[in-house]
Image (spheres, coloured by chain):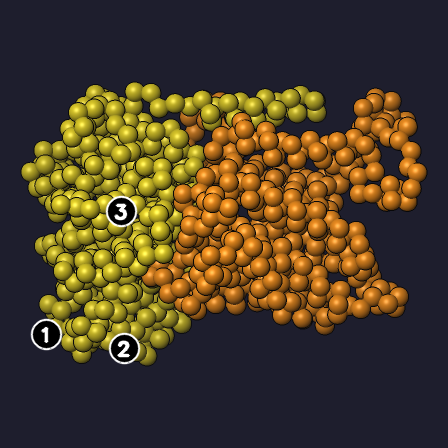
Chain colours: A orange, B yellow
């Protein structure tokens, strides 16, 4: 009744091929942005912003990165946790060498380092596919983890082996380091994520994105009609690792404040892959939904007994948490193997005909 | 049906956001408890958390709190994971938290820069960043009774007193390859140059904790005269088993105080006879205060211990000792400020004036439980004495008096490391001590 495009006529090709062809969707997008930029900063508690929203946005960005590779190009990677690490460590080195440069610029620059590393480890994808590619990206993961421990230059020879974020200002506002306010960090993360999502959407809907999807759907046919696999696959690896790298830099510089190798271990790679699969392969909305499912749901489950006034041990809650989230993942994948994004699409379809389904 | 579920979910979420914002401190002393009863290190984390929580519960049950103000605790599960630890910190810091005991060097490293901003001290008892014991540079961080560097120097001092000195010997150092295990290496390198011994390092990654045959093959090749271990969790048992397998002389194998728990040694049993480890608190339940814990908490079923025999084990007593230090620091803060309900800044003063002398320990019902701790503005935790215990095949036996660390040398190295930490942080809060 409310969600229906009756009466909305498209009078140009541009309108017809818009990403959000329906007026209600466009309103919804502005509404979400208003919530993110205005409502949450105004009314959200520090905990909500710092421990829920910032990590959610960081993981959503990393998930978009992996979705570009896995969802749109059909190449599976288990090395994205380490590619995030490349972004974090290179930002750390850049910040050390260029202390006066705008730190946001350096965070974005660090993406190029992880893109380069991602391309190197993406080279085998030209020859091998599927599970074998998983193994080579897993090798990337282990190699990079080793490098983060064994090359002390990367962490400026700190005794602790951890990278610690120094204080940096942008336009006289402290954005990194322990003195940075939650809001300034939140706005930087949110802006970067929004802009990069918009860019990703444009790349995906453009010529390059289409060539990725052709490779995904049938690489031989794609090659026959003139898509160069070398360019398509490597560009996908590059863009994907770029996103992962920026997400890693955001994670350390604007969320955690300090990190060791453990922050980028293989579990992170799996976590991001789960976000992609749960959210929905080949969907930007799905990337956000997947990140929300994996990151926010456990926090809500953890909070429930405290709110209900139930006296349950923290460890029991944690065990229950693992079980509930695990069961839900299985349940969701049985109900809808194409992820939350597909459920969202079905829901929208149903809404269009509600309340008179035919 | 679907509608009901959705409405329920919405209600819960709304309630959640309301609760998080409206929770207030009230008339209590709030000590959040970060613990890990899940994950790969749960076997060690559980007794620590039990000891810590039970002592606070006993103080509440027996004395009605500290000077009449009850202690409120809130357990938050970290799983020994830094990200979850930070989440716990963020979730609890707004409720008037007095002190954080992170129980993981990784979490400690994350919290150290946050402590001065939020004005809540971090108390990493016998772990964490060693340099944080320099009070001038780290006003908000405490490491009582001793840092990892102190502990390493004590162990080296002990080795030096055996078999005609350490000069010219070869020392093997096997460690968990994370921040915690790498922490004492700078001091070990300094000592090896100064005292003329050779160091061979054997890192053990978290993933290979339970399969250390390659490391121990190297140990067999290198033949070190002594082995020192900085291990945790499953790594300890595996290392001791492997050492027994290659017939390494057990009495020349010394663990730090995280490598000497009952849970680590029981699976090896008699084969580990002679293995030594450092410790800071006595084991056993024959102390009036621990008897009170049994009486007021454990026997009433208010504790999470599975079995009564867990009370008095090495890690349980360490968690309890941690709680003792926190309680005494609160007392000191109350006395100094004249307030009954204190805040984080008062707590910091309390820690700087912490005085766990032998008499005081006797008063609170823990005579000869641990060696004295005396806090000061300058010294936030270096120099407390460490003693050694030895496994007799069934239980731990204390075998040495306190071995004072090489305080001068360690302090100099700590100051240097602290300066380095602070150097690239322009706004870092320091203090001057008289």
Could you say which disc has been placed on residue B223 in the image? Answer: 2
Mark 1–mark 2 Cα distance, whole angstroms, equals 18 Å
Q: How crowded is the residue under tag 1: few (<14 C-alpha within 10 Å), some, or many (20+)? A: few
Disc 1: which chain?
B
Q: Position of residue A90 (x, y in %)?
A: 51, 62
Subunit that carries the residue with mark 2: B
Q: Which badge, 3 or 1, is on the more N-terminal residue? A: 1
**In the rendering, which numbered label is found on residue B430?**
3
Label 2, residues with CA under 10 Å away: few <14, some 14-19, many ≥20: some
Instruction: Place residue B323 in its image quadrant.
Output: top left
Q: Are marks 3 and 2 in contact (CB under 8 Å)?
A: no
Dot label at residue B164: 1
Q: Residues within 10 Å of mark 3 (few under 14, many from 20)?
A: some
Q: Nearer the viewer, residue A244 or A310?
A: A244
Horizontal and vertical percent position of residue B314: 24, 47
Single out the mark in the foreground, 3 or 2: 3
Residue at x 69%, y 31% (from the top left corner): A31
Give the side of residue A11 with respect to residue A244, left or right.
right
| Residue B291 in view here | no
Can marks 3 and 2 be said to lie on one chain?
A: yes
**Mark 3, secondary structure of its residue:** loop
Position of residue B399 measured from the top left corner of the image (x, y, whole percent): 12, 56
- Let me know if marks 1 and 2 both belong to one chain: yes
Q: Position of residue B174 (x, y in %)?
A: 32, 66
Identity of the residue drawn at 43% across and 37% down: B90
Front position in the image: A45 or A168: A168
């Amino acid at each position: 009744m409310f969600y229906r495009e009756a009466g909305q006529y498209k009078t140009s090709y541009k309108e017809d091929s818009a990403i959000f062809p329906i007026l209600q969707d466009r309103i919804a997008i502005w509404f979400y942005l208003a919530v993110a930029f205005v409502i949450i900063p105004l009314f959200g508690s520090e905990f909500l912003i710092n421990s829920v929203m910032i990590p959610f946005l960081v993981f959503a960005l990393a998930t978009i990165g992996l979705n570009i590779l896995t969802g749109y190009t059909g190449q599976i990677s288990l090395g994205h946790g380490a590619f995030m690490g490349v972004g974090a460590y290179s930002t750390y080195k850049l910040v050390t060498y260029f202390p006066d440069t705008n730190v946001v610029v350096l965070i974005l620059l660090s993406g190029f380092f992880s893109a380069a590393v991602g391309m190197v480890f993406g080279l085998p994808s030209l020859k091998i596919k599927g599970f074998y590619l998983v193994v080579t990206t897993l090798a990337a993961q282990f190699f990079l983890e080793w490098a983060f421990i064994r090359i002390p230059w990367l962490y400026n020879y700190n005794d602790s082996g951890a990278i610690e974020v120094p204080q940096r200002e942008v336009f006289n506002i402290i954005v990194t380091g322990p003195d940075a306010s939650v809001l300034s960090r939140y706005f930087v993360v949110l802006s970067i994520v929004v802009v990069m999502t918009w860019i990703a959407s444009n790349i995906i809907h453009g010529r390059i994105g289409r060539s990725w999807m052709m490779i995904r759907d049938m690489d031989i046919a794609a090659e026959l009609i003139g898509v160069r696999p070398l360019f398509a696959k490597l560009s996908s690896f590059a863009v994907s690792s770029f996103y992962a790298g920026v997400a890693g830099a955001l994670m350390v510089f604007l969320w955690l404040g300090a990190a060791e190798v453990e922050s980028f271990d293989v579990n992170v790679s799996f976590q991001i892959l789960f976000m992609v699969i749960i959210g929905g392969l080949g969907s930007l909305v799905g990337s956000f939904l997947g990140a929300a499912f994996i990151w926010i749901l456990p926090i809500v489950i953890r909070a429930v007994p405290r709110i209900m006034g139930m006296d349950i041990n923290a460890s029991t809650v944690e065990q229950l948490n693992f079980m509930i989230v695990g069961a839900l993942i299985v349940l969701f994948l049985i109900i809808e193997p194409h992820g939350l994004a597909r459920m969202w699409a079905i829901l929208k379809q149903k809404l269009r005909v509600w309340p008179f389904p035919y | 049906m679907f509608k009901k579920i959705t409405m329920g979910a919405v209600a819960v979420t709304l309630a959640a956001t309301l609760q998080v914002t409206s929770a207030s401190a009230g008339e209590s002393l709030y000590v959040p408890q970060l613990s890990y009863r899940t994950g790969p290190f749960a076997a060690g984390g559980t007794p620590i958390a039990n000891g810590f929580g039970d002592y606070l519960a006993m103080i509440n049950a027996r004395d009605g709190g500290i000077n009449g103000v009850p202690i409120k605790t809130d357990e938050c599960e970290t799983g020994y994971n830094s990200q979850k630890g930070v989440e716990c910190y963020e979730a609890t810091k707004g409720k008037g938290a007095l002190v954080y005991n992170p129980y993981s060097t990784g979490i400690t490293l994350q919290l150290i820069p946050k402590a001065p901003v939020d004005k809540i001290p971090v108390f990493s008892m016998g772990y964490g960043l060693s340099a944080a014991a320099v009070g001038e540079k780290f006003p908000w961080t405490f490491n009582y009774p001793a840092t990892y560097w102190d502990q390493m120097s004590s162990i080296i001092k002990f080795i030096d007193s055996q078999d005609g000195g350490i000069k010219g010997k070869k020392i093997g150092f096997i460690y968990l390859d994370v921040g915690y295990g790498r922490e004492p290496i700078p001091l070990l390198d300094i000592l090896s140059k100064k005292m003329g011994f050779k160091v061979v390092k054997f890192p053990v990654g978290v993933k290979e904790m339970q399969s250390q045959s390659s490391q121990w093959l190297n140990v067999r090749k290198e033949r070190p005269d002594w082995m020192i271990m900085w291990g945790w969790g499953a790594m300890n048992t595996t290392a001791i088993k492997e050492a027994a397998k290659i017939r390494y002389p057990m009495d020349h194998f010394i663990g730090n105080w995280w490598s000497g728990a009952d849970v680590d040694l029981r699976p090896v049993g008699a084969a580990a006879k002679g293995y030594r480890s450092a410790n800071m608190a006595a084991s056993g339940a024959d102390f009036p205060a621990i008897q009170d814990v049994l009486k007021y908490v454990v026997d009433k079923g208010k504790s999470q211990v599975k079995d009564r025999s867990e009370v008095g084990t090495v890690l349980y007593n360490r968690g309890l000792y941690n709680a003792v230090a926190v309680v005494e620091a609160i007392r000191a803060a109350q006395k100094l400020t004249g307030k009954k309900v204190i805040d984080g800044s008062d707590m910091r003063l309390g820690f700087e004036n912490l005085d766990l002398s032998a008499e005081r320990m006797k008063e609170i019902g823990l005579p000869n439980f641990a060696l004295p701790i005396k806090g000061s503005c300058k010294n936030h935790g270096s120099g407390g004495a460490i003693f050694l215990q030895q496994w007799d095949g069934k239980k731990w036996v204390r075998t040495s008096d306190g071995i004072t660390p090489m305080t001068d040398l360690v302090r100099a190295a700590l100051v240097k490391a602290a300066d380095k930490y602070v150097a690239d942080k322009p706004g870092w809060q320091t203090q001057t001590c008289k």
